[in-house]
Image (spheres, rainbow, N blue to C red):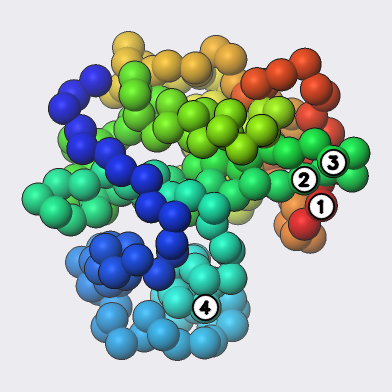
């Protein structure tokens, strides 16, 4: 792996993460950072701006209640992140949802593309957190409502990301589980097994 500086944060209100979200608004989305604290609805954000603006606004960000956030840091500044949250199913099994709100600042994408799956990257760090919290496996979801997100689903189902393919780790061990509803939204589920316990998306408690 390239010499990346990765850290784990446990508080979503950490000032470094607030600065990261401000960078998304100001530098990537050209939105006044004063709107970060706006409490508008999802529809308002997507009509006036886009879904990223909604996701990284204070209201949505805090509502998620991450258990851990993996971050790439450069010059004391967070430039990429991947959130994680522990879920339980109706049988009492714990599973870690990963790759939540995954984002790389535009100015750093050339360097950090593939940071999730490179050796010692975000996915490796999610595994460490999952095992330390007695999780039976890890999953992530993609809601493919745009061409970008449909391409992301295709990347994971075909195992092809041309510019980072030679560096990818765990790529062939991730199982596409199909489409299930999570928080009333139909999403594509992907699963990485850490035990023999069966993962049933329908049994997750949300």
Give the quarter of the figure containing the N terminus: top left
Residue 61 position within the rendered picture, expressed as x and y whole percent measured from the top left:
49, 68
Q: Are marks 1 and 4 in contact (CB under 8 Å)?
A: no
Query: Which residue sits at x=57%, y=63%?
Result: 65
- Quarter of the image for residue 44 reads bottom right
Is 179 rendered above or below residue 22? above
Query: Which residue sits at x=59%, y=83%?
Result: 41
Circle 2: element type: strand
Mark 4 or 2: the one toward you: 2
Q: Which mark is residue 110?
A: none
Q: Which mark is residue 88?
A: 2
Q: Which residue is mark 3?
A: 92
Is 206 rendered above or below residue 131? below
Residue 59 position within the rendered picture, expressed as x and y whole percent measured from the top left:
52, 78
Q: Which mark is residue 205?
A: 1
Residue 159 position within the rendered picture, expressed as x and y whole percent measured from the top left:
50, 18
Real-space CA distance between mark 2 and mark 3, rounded to the nearest whole angstrom: 6 Å
Mark 2 nearby-residue class (10 Å; few <14, some 14–19, many ≥20): some
Q: Are marks 2 and 1 in contact (CB under 8 Å)?
A: yes
Real-space CA distance between mark 1 and mark 3, rounded to the nearest whole angstrom: 10 Å
Which is more toward the observer, 197 or 164? 197
Real-space CA distance between mark 1 and mark 4, rounded to the nearest whole angstrom: 22 Å
Q: Earlier in the sequence, mark 2 or mark 1?
A: 2
Circle 4: element type: helix
Mark 3 nearby-residue class (10 Å; few <14, some 14–19, many ≥20): few
Residue 100 position within the rendered picture, expressed as x and y whole percent measured from the top left:
52, 49
Give the quarter of the figure containing the C terminus: bottom right
- Quarter of the image for residue 121 reads top left
């Amino acid at each position: 792996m390239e010499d990346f500086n990765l850290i784990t944060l446990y508080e979503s209100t950490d000032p470094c993460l607030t600065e990261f979200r401000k960078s998304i608004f100001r530098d990537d989305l050209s939105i006044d950072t004063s709107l970060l604290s706006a409490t508008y609805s999802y529809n308002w954000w997507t009509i006036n701006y886009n879904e990223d603006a909604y996701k990284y606004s204070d209201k949505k960000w805090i509502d998620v209640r991450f258990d851990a956030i993996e971050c790439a840091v450069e010059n004391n500044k967070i430039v990429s992140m991947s959130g994680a949250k522990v879920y339980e199913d109706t049988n009492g099994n714990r599973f870690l949802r990963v790759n939540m709100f995954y984002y790389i600042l535009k100015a750093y994408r050339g360097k950090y593309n593939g940071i999730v799956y490179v050796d010692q990257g975000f996915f490796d760090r999610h595994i460490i957190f999952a095992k330390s919290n007695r999780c039976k496996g890890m999953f992530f979801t993609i809601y493919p409502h745009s061409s970008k997100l449909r391409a992301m689903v295709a990347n994971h189902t075909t195992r092809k990301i041309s510019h980072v393919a030679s560096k990818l780790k765990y790529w062939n061990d991730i199982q596409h589980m199909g489409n299930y509803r999570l928080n009333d939204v139909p999403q594509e589920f992907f699963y990485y097994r850490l035990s023999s316990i069966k993962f049933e998306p329908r049994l997750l408690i949300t």
